[in-house]
Image (cartoon, rainbow, N blue to C red):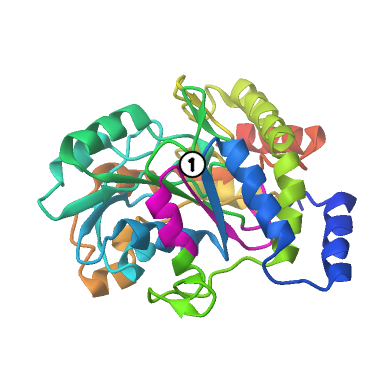
Amino acid sequence: MIPIAKPWITEEEKKEVLKVLDSGILASGEWVKRFEEEFAKYIGVKYALTTTNGTQALILGLEAIGVKGKEVLVPSFTFIASATSIIRAGGKPVFVDVDPKTFNIDVEDARKKITENTVAIMPVHLYGQSADMDAIKELAEEKELYVIEDACQAHGAEWKGKKTGGLGDIAAFSFYPTKNMTTGEGGMVTTNNDELAEKVAMLRNHGQKERYLHSELGWNFRMTNIAAAIGVVQLRRLDKANEIRRKNAKIYDEELEGIVEVPFVDQRAKHVYHQYTIKVKNRDKLIRAFKDNEIGFGIYYPRGIHQQPVMQKLGFGNVKLPITEKLINEVISIPVHPLVSEEDITKIVQVIRKNA
């Protein structure tokens, strides 16, 4: 079986985890601090704050900027956590359509949906390609909105030479096992804003600024040293892993051009291919062929968030998004991760050529 995703774990991660276990300090400590410092330096921001997963990173960022009772613009063509995090933070998701080429948030559609109650816009750097941050920041400045980046699929991605996660007011990353780097589970909040960083640090640790003095209603969203130890090693190998993804994507581009619609890459962006997602006319036929040939695949996503039963139940799904509703029937993602071999890629290409 060729898996759609596979974490790249080596002896280095194992050795680092054993150091943590031998230290006896398994909760947040030295390794967490090191991971935060190295991640902040990598992204190019003042602050990087670990947390338990990407969803909690989004919730912390949203709570820090203060979305309770307010509206947040968010694309519907993404994983549901982008929207549920807004609701958990007390806000209201306002669903926006996406660009038909990049699949990232349509800024003009976002503009139309701004009201006096809108407080923030959440671009999702989908599949590892940055959203149009020039247009987003221009709109945010004009309308006095916060920009919270959902960078959960975009570790190492860039916009005009600057890394995602350092382009808005605050950002969230996920370290789930399928991501470009992993800690097993885990997340990170990044920002250059002193006040937002302080608020996140308090909220993730029971609302305390100093031990046993609780000034906010907080959470226990702390990362462990065990997870951080894996993250330290993964971060150091991230650029190498991303370059392998980019090399694999280039092969697909060359072999599949004209057969299917290959990913469009904005020339201002550096795509890191969390997913390599193609558009096909006969997806059901291709899915059957993938299953017959033991090739992993993913449909990201089979429905827009606004179409999910929970959003209908909560009253947030009453919207029409034509591009999103078209894409959900066309997209399919194929293995692009660093552990896909050239032999695997050749087989995948052959199956697509025969069945697309």
Residue 92 falls inside the magenta stretch: no
Residue 193 falls inside the magenta stretch: yes
Residue at (55, 49) in percent of width and height: 48
Looking at this view, is 130 or 18 the one in front?
Answer: 18
Res. 297 in view: yes
Q: Is residue 187 left or right of residue 181?
A: left
Res. 81 in view: no
Looking at this view, is 48 or 267 the one in front?
Answer: 48
Q: Is residue 343 left or right of residue 94?
A: right
Q: Which residue is mark 1?
A: 165
Q: Residue furthest bottom?
A: 212
Q: Is residue 71 left or right of residue 191?
A: left
- Residue 247, quarter of the rendered image: top right
Residue 150 percent across, percent down from the top left: 43, 48
Residue kind at label 1, given as amino acid type: Gly
- Residue 227, quarter of the rendered image: bottom right
Label count reads 1
Q: Is residue 298 left or right of residue 87?
A: right
Above or below residue 160? Residue 354 is below
Neighbour tally class for label 1: few under 14, some 14-19, many 20 plus, Cα within 10 Å: many
Residue at (70, 71) in percent of width and height: 27
Q: Does dot 1 land on a helix, a strand or a loop?
A: loop
Looking at this view, is 259 or 164 the one in front?
Answer: 164
| Chain part drawn in magenta | 176-201
Q: Residue furthest left?
A: 116
Residue 152 percent across, percent down from the top left: 51, 50
Looking at this view, is 133 or 213 the one in front?
Answer: 213
Give the position of the C terminus as an image quadrant: top right
Above or below residue 40? Residue 349 is above
Residue 203 percent across, percent down from the top left: 44, 68
